[in-house]
């Protein structure tokens, strides 16, 4: 079964540093997403991406965050000047649009720890 | 305003028990609903979709009541492997809106 792959599985960074979280979506999917989950809290939508541009973003996704698909396969989330409260699990997902919301596949996540 | 609300639990039940989870949502225009399962520090995984007519998948039954804006999940004959957090999820224009989840612990 096709998978969404995320690297690294765990990233520790110093406050104020920049991090890049990487994702390889399923190859024939067209919609890509980032979600995050702070420990003990709910999974929250960050941003959706289609046709090489952001299609929707949440209030959380401010100027500190950016996404890109640099080479047609990887989908990255960059967090600039990390803060302690950015510590969370970050999940990438891709969507088989033919199945609408029923076609989500999540990656196994990157656990970001900001110290 | 919480869009999707769930009882956080935990629900501690013995093997073989029947357990029911409930969820309410606030957006009456919502079209699609799901139950996801999440194991500790893992990604959410789709358990089943939820339809007004109700749907059943083995030991799991999901029901949607649009008039009451209420969703339920029933697990029969619970197994140790059912221990997880169950997430009530609303689909909204391709994005997913998650509830905080209900934790289930099935004991021998």
Image (cartoon, coloured by chain):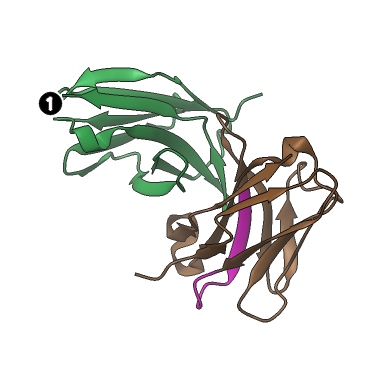
Q: Nearer the viewer, residue A76 or A14?
A: A14
Relative image position of residue A103 (x, y in whole percent): 44, 60
Q: Nearer the viewer, residue B23 or B87?
A: B87
Relative image position of residue B17 (x, y in whole percent): 16, 22
- Residue A88, relative to residue B9: is it above or below? below
**Chain for mark 1?**
B
Residue closest to the far bottom = A71
The N terminus of chain B lies in quadrant? top right
User: Which residue is rendered at x = 49% and y = 72% of the image?
Assistant: A26
- Residue A11, relative to residue A43: is it above or below? below
Relative image position of residue A39 (x, y in whole percent): 58, 33
Instruction: Sort mark 1 into few (<14), some (14-19) or many (20+) by Cα contacts within 10 Å.
Output: some
The picture quadrant where one finds residue B79 is top left
User: Which residue is rendered at x = 43% and y = 32% of the image?
Assistant: B66
User: Which residue is rendered at x = 17% and y = 38% of the image?
Assistant: B59
| Colour in which chain A is drawn | brown
Left or right of A1? Residue A34 is right
Membership of A6 in magenta stretch:
no
| Colour in which chain B is drawn | green
Span colored in magenta: A25-35
The picture quadrant where one finds residue A72 is bottom right
The picture quadrant where one finds residue A56 is bottom right
Q: Mark 1 highlights which residue?
A: B16
């Amino acid at each position: 079964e096709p998978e969404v792959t995320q690297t690294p599985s765990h990233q520790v960074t110093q406050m104020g540093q920049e991090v890049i979280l990487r994702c390889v979506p399923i190859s024939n999917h067209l919609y890509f997403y980032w979600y995050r989950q702070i420990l003990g809290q709910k999974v929250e939508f960050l941003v959706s991406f289609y046709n090489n541009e952001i299609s929707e973003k949440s209030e959380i996704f401010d100027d500190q965050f950016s996404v890109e698909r640099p080479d047609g396969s990887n989908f990255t989330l960059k967090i600039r000047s990390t803060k302690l409260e950015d510590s969370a699990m970050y999940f990438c997902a891709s969507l088989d649009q033919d199945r609408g919301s029923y076609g989500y596949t999540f990656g196994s996540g990157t656990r970001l720890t900001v110290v | 305003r919480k869009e999707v609300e769930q009882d956080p639990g935990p629900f501690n039940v013995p093997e073989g028990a029947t357990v029911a989870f409930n969820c309410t949502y606030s957006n009456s225009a919502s079209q699609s609903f799901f139950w996801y399962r999440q194991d500790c520090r893992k990604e959410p995984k789709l358990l089943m979709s939820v339809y007004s007519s109700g749907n059943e998948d083995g030991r799991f039954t999901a029901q949607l009541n649009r008039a009451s804006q209420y969703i339920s999940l029933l697990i029969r004959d619970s197994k140790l492997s059912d221990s997880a957090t169950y997430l009530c999820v609303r689909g909204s224009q391709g994005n997913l809106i998650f509830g905080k989840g209900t934790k289930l612990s099935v004991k021998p």
